[in-house]
Amino acid sequence: MWTRKGDWLECIIPALWSGLTIEQLLKEVWAASKKLAHRWRMEQGVKLNGQAVSWQTALREQDRLQFYAYEPEPSPIIPEYRELSVLWEDDHLLILNKEAGIDIHPSEPEQTGTLANAVAFYLQAQAILTKIRHIHRLDRDTSGAILFAKHPLAGATLDRMLARRTVKRTYIALVHGRLSPKVGTISAPIGRDRHHPTRRRVSKTGAKAVTHYRVLETFPSTSLVELSLETGRTHQIRVHLAHLGHPLVGDTLYGGQPIFHRHALHAAKLTFRHPFTNEEVVCLAPTDDFPVPLPSVYSQEHC
């Protein structure tokens, strides 16, 4: 269905998109930004069967649609080699299993040692010189699955999917105490803590934040919990669980005891429908860096 040809991608139009105009497919289905659409119009960055045509042209099954996916973009990210754990990859997307103790992206110019630096090197080796686009974030000491887009159109459509909550993120945490009830929803707005530069807190004036949880297993003084996010606020899971009186094991910023070398939170699963192939992607991220064994359903790599 998709073939990479240098800096271009070619799609053989399936029956699903037959009858749509080029403009409808780019803007409505794939959420192309106004800036990207304008650039492609001006530079003839979209072609049908090898020819520049009106974007009002209706697509037919088996047509060949080409677009200039990997136009080189200026980026402040310095490419730097680092071994990566790739869970899933194609010409559009990259899903990595992030280890704990590494930042997602630099916080200052010329910084290296982040996951973004390593992804820049990895993509450069594939002759992809686009900007580094992580679709969601994980805290420095959170491990697990994280999604990157390889080109700007993929970035735009995945951003919209995240906003519409069609990218499902499932986390596993070990918390202090025993949660009751064992299944529940935490709906509590989160804002900055004015007494601390990085900490967040539940605040009436904060942004809406909703976390669903389910207790998987209980131990004498801790509980293993599965969590999913409706929103994606900074430190959301950590703040919400601390708000309930059950901070993450090892999360000293939010009241957890330092009985593990980091806060015990792992992004165990990503699920979404691929915007360019329509296949269901279910990605599990294993880890051996957790205070207790993960349930068997999460303990093996699978995508």
Image (cartoon, rainbow, N blue to C red):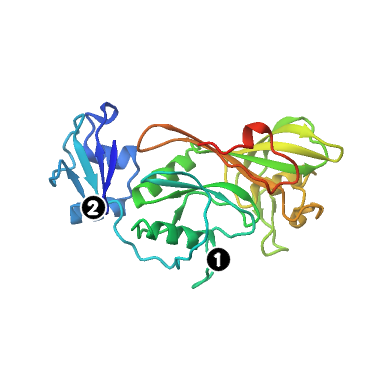
Horizontal placement of 238 versus 39: left or right? right
* Disc 2 and disc 1 in contact, CB within 8 angstroms: no
Specify the quadrant that holds the N terminus.
Answer: top left
Amino acid type, mark 2 = Trp
Which dot, 2 or 1, sits closer to the camera? 1
**Residue 288 on image: x %, y %:** 67, 46
Amino acid type, mark 1 = Gly
Question: Element at badge 1?
Answer: loop
Name the residue: 71% across, 63% down.
196
The furthest residue to the top: 15
What is the quadrant of residue 212 in the picture?
A: top right
Which residue is the site of mark 1? 113
Which residue is the site of mark 2? 40
- Residue 35 vertical position relative to residue 21 in the rendered view, above or below: below
Mark 2 vs 1, N-terminal side: 2
Horizontal placement of 156 versus 67: left or right? right
Name the residue: 26% across, 53% down.
6
Report the Cα–Cα distance between label 2 and label 1.
Answer: 34 Å
The furthest residue to the right: 220
**Residue 276 on image: x %, y %:** 35, 38
| Labels in figure, total | 2
**Residue 101 on image: x %, y %:** 64, 59
User: Are there few (<14), some (14-19), or many (20+) residues within 10 Å of tag 1?
Assistant: some
What is the quadrant of residue 301 in the picture?
A: top right
User: Are there few (<14), some (14-19), or many (20+) residues within 10 Å of tag 2?
Assistant: some
Question: Element at badge 2?
Answer: helix
Disc sitting over residue 105 in the figure: none
